[in-house]
Structure formats: structure tokens, C-alpha cells
Image (spheres, rainbow, N blue to C red):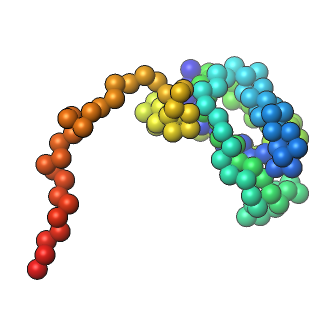
Amino acid sequence: MVNYEGMFLLDSGKFAADHEGTIAHVIEILEKAGAEIVAHRPWQDGKLAYEIEGHMKGLHYLVYFTMPGSGMDAVTRACHLSDIVIRQLVIKQPQTLFDAMVSAIDPSAAPETEASSDDDVDYSAIDDDEDED
């Protein structure tokens, strides 16, 4: 299984009319391709820099998921056929970045790690005082 970050540009009009249905559509595309969704959320909604397929506005929807690499063709094909997904960009993520972004989006979905205490931090290397002339 490979870690992926997917940014989906969605039709903001359809998202405004049916939040749950639009999100379910994106999740369904990924799950049909064999993906396991780890975290997802809307990122940004607003005016696009330029018109894309007749759309001047769009919603960027961020999804973190794991999936075999062989499922990427199915995701791309389904997004091209979708009337909700305007564009998509999916990139591989290294495990450390993937875990950090998942915990930022959905702390409950983050992997279990030991919390570091202030006793473990070496503050002697930090110099807050500026040299005064």
C-alpha cells in the first residue's frame, strides 16, 4: 500500500447544494479503486485564477489515503468521467509527511506516538537574547 495525498477540485455549486453527496462521490471513487481513506476535509472554496471547463469557482477537497499503485488508473478514469470532479492531483507521500498531515487534519486518525515532554527538550541551544551594542 502506498500513501497518497489527493487534491480534488470540485464543482462548488454541487458541493453547496449537497455537501454529503459530493463528499460521498469522491470517497466512492477512491474506494472503488481500492483506497483506504485515512483523513479528508474541504481545503479552500473560492474563485479560480482562470476558467476551467466553464467553471470560475471551485472547492479544493483534500484527501489522504492508502492504496495500491495499480488503482491510480481507475481513480484518474473515474475523475475524468465525473461531473462533480473538475480536476484532480494525486501525489505519493513519504510516511513521516503523511502522518504529520493526517494528524493536522484529523488528530483522531493520527498514528499512536509517545508524546514528548518538556524534559526531553534541550533549551540550552536556544538563544533568545539578542546582542546589544
Count all numbered tags in the image, as a single digit: 0
Q: Is residue 34 left or right of residue 94?
A: right
Q: Is residue 130 left or right of residue 6?
A: left
Q: Position of residue 54 (x, y in %)?
A: 88, 57
Q: Position of residue 116 (x, y in %)?
A: 29, 32
Q: Position of residue 80 (x, y in %)?
A: 82, 39
User: In the image shown, does 53 or 101 lie closer to the viewer?
Assistant: 101
On screen, 114 above or below 12?
A: above
User: In the image shown, does 125 or 80 lie closer to the viewer?
Assistant: 125
Q: Which quarter of the figure is the C terminus placed in? A: bottom left
Can you name the residue that lies furthest to the left here? 133
User: In the image shown, does 77 or 3 lie closer to the viewer?
Assistant: 3
Q: Is residue 106 left or right of residue 19?
A: left
On screen, 43 above or below 79?
A: below
Q: Position of residue 31 (x, y in %)?
A: 73, 22
On screen, 90 above or below 9?
A: above
Q: Name which residue lies at 64% across and 35% down.
A: 40
Q: Is residue 105 visible?
A: yes
Q: Which quarter of the figure is the N terminus placed in? A: top right
Q: Is residue 29 left or right of residue 1?
A: right
Q: Name which residue lies at 13% across and 48% down.
A: 124
